[in-house]
Every structure is written in C-alpha cells, then in structure tokens.
Image (cartoon, rainbow, N blue to C red):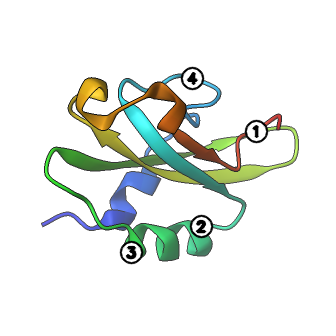
Amino acid sequence: MTTPHEVLNQECDAPSLAPVPNAVNWSIFRRRGDAELHADRIQLGPGHALIGGHGHDSIGDYWWVGVRVESLAQWGSKQAINKRGRLGD
C-alpha cells in the first residue's frame, strides 16, 4: 500500500509552473514535513486523487501536494480551482 507521502518523492514542478491535467487544488511548502502533514489531512472524494512532488526554484527546494479530479466539468467552474502558495504570486 502506498502512503500519501510517496507522491512527494517524485521530481515534478508545481502545477503553477508546469500544468498538471485536472489539478484543482495544490499547496506549496518549503519543508517536506509541512507537505507531509498537509497530505495527511487531505480528504479525497470519489474520483479524486492525491498528487504532488518536489522541485527547486531560485529560493531553494519546495514540495507540493494537491488534488486531481477525473473531470473538471464535474468539479465546477475553473474559477473554483484553488492554488495556494503559487510561485510568482
């Protein structure tokens, strides 16, 4: 069985830098432990999957955790996509 923390092992830029299909919610953290804590608290609904990864920018390492849905149409308006901690904001 995989753990929520395993998504953080993959090198993958945050969706605000490299779009991830059907990503609707993500948060960026500077410490892996904070990302792990956040991942543990995410409650997924039917058709939702935990996504995440780690990357590096001009400040240093970062980890991100988010949610991908099967269908953006079922999610609702694209305006409802929540991007917390986007790089460059």
Q: Earlier in the sequence, mark 4 or mark 3?
A: 4
- Whole-number angstrom distance, CA of label 3 to CA of label 1: 23 Å
Vertical comparison of 87 with 50: above or below: above
Which residue is disc 4 drawn over?
18
User: What kind of element bears circle 4?
Assistant: loop
Residue type at mark 4: give it. Answer: Ala
- Neighbour tally class for label 1: few under 14, some 14-19, many 20 plus, Cα within 10 Å: few
Q: Earlier in the sequence, mark 3 or mark 1?
A: 3
User: What kind of element bears circle 2?
Assistant: helix
Q: Residue at x 58, y 34 (%)?
A: 13
Q: Quadrant of residue 15?
A: top right
Which residue is disc 2 drawn over?
32
- Whole-number angstrom distance, CA of label 4 to CA of label 1: 11 Å
Q: Position of residue 51 (x, y in %)?
A: 37, 46
Q: Residue furthest right?
A: 59
Q: Quadrant of the N terminus?
A: bottom left
Q: Earlier in the sequence, mark 4 or mark 1?
A: 4
Which residue is disc 1 drawn over?
87
